Amino acid sequence: MVLNGIGLTQFAATELSLAEKGIASAKVILTGFVVVFSVLLLLIGVIKLYSFIVGKAQGSGGSKKKKKEQTPPEKKKVTAEISKPAEVKQALPAGEGIPEEVVAVIAAAVATMYGKSGRAKIKSIKKAGGRSAWANAGVLDNTRPF
């Protein structure tokens, strides 16, 4: 009996039992895994070899003398004294657990922002509760409808 290629595969498929089909499928899947992971390991090796070669080429470029470590120029120390006016200390009630230094920094930031126009007044300072801004962003990102 002579069969062409198409008829042979149909004939072979009808002759195999369910267990034999499962075994053949498992062989194909395992062969695929072995091929994929072996190529992946080969690529990792090639990339590491390439990085080693490039590192050696860059490390020995030119002279063999050690390069002098360049020190950054000295930075000028900038110090600013912030004096707390008595009126700010009295006008701003520090909340529970908020140090006076934090209150002074917040007052200085507001004064810098708005200047001496007198448009901004700090009525109270309290710690924010609940989630952080990053947590809120994560919740919004994960619950946004498609």
Image (spheres, rainbow, N blue to C red):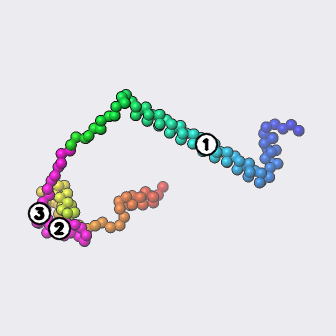
What residue would you read off at disc 2? Answer: 92
Query: Which amino acid, by three-letter code, is at mark 1?
Result: Ser
Residue 102 placed where, x, y %?
22, 63
**Considering depth in this image, is 129 or 80 the residue closer to the camera?**
80
Q: Secondary structure at mark 2?
A: loop
Q: Is residue 29 magenta?
A: no
Residue 139 placed where, x, y %?
42, 60
**Residue under the point 74% across and 51% down:** 23
Contact flag, marks 2 and 3 (Cβ < 8 Å): no
Contact flag, marks 1 and 2 (Cβ < 8 Å): no
Residue 92 placed where, x, y %?
17, 67
**Residue under the point 14% across and 56% down:** 81
Query: Which amino acid, by three-letter code, is at mark 3?
Result: Pro
Compute the Cα span from label 1 to label 2.
68 Å
Q: Secondary structure at mark 1?
A: helix
Q: Is residue 138 above or below residue 62?
A: below
Compute the Cα span from label 1 to label 3.
72 Å
What residue would you read off at disc 1? Answer: 38
- Residue 117 makes an appearance in the image: no
